[in-house]
């Protein structure tokens, strides 16, 4: 499971579709509808949120917006409810953001060279709106692979 912190616009089609599936799985886990993945480290930041289910619904809404922007047809009813005005953001360290972008680029270099090349011009890595950047290194829940 990979719940990206970086903006979903950097993902290729395969990565975006996988993110939708994995975010839906995360929602089911957080809602207590799945017995598997309950201890997956990617969920730690959502578990720590005061309203984990609303936070993952907001995350899913952002994924949905990106898939719609690309012309895909996904089921909006799967997003779920959240109050964006009162939803606290999830802190994520700068080192995590940089790590994820580098990790994605490594994947894209072999999977989608056009997406890889498009991302080469990125100077300031944007993140999903449910997160806020803070100083720090790679998050403790990350399983470093590069």
Image: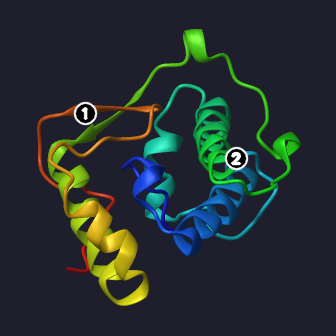
Within-10-Å neighbours for mark 2: few <14, some 14–19, many 20+:
few
Furthest-top residue in view? 85
Specify how the rendered protein is coloured.
rainbow
Q: Identify the residue under disc 1.
A: 133
- Mark seen at residue 118: none
Local secondary structure at mark 2: helix
Q: Which residue is mark 2?
A: 68
The correct choice, above or below, for 2 with respect to 138 in the image is: below
Where residue 103 appears, as percent x and y from the top left, is 28, 72
- Give the number of callouts: 2
Where residue 146 sits, quadrant-wise, is: bottom left
**Could you tell me how far apart the alpha carbons at marks 2 and 1 are, in whole angstroms?**
26 Å
Place of residue 33 in the rendered image (x, y in percent of width and height, measured from the top left): 82, 55
Tell me where residue 77 appears, x and y as whole percent: 88, 41
Q: Nearer the viewer, residue 20 or 87?
A: 20
The residue carrying pointer 1 sits among few (fewer than 14), some (14 to 19) or many (20 or more) residues within 10 Å by Cα, namely some
- Examine the image and state in which quarter residue 145 appears: bottom left
45 over 52 or under it: above or below: below
Q: Quadrant of residue 76?
A: top right
Sequence order check: which comes first, mark 2 or mark 1? 2
**Does residue 100 appear anywhere in the picture?**
yes
**Which of the two marks, 2 or 1, is nearer to us in this view?**
2
Q: Is residue 33 above or below residue 103?
A: above
Residue sitting at x 70%, y 23%: 82
**143 on left or right of 121:** right
Residue displayed at 70% across by 61% down: 25
Q: Residue at x 25, y 57 (%)?
A: 140
Per the image, label 1 sits on a secondary structure element best described as: strand
Is 4 displayed left or right of 74 in the figure?
left
Residue 118 percent across, percent down from the top left: 31, 63
């Amino acid at each position: 499971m990979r719940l990206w912190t970086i903006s979903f616009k950097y993902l290729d089609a395969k990565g975006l579709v996988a993110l939708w599936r994995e975010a839906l799985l995360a929602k089911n886990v957080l809602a207590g509808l799945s017995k598997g993945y309950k201890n997956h480290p990617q969920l730690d930041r959502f578990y720590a949120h005061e309203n984990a289910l609303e936070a993952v619904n907001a995350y899913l809404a952002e994924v949905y917006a990106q898939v719609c922007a690309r012309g895909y047809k996904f089921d909006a009813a799967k997003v779920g409810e959240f109050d964006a005005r009162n939803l606290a953001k999830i802190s994520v360290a700068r080192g995590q953001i940089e790590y994820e972008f580098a990790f994605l680029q490594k994947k894209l270099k072999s999977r989608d060279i056009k997406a890889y090349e498009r991302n080469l011009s990125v100077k300031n890595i944007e993140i999903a709106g449910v997160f806020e950047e803070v100083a720090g290194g790679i998050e403790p829940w990350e399983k470093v692979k590069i």
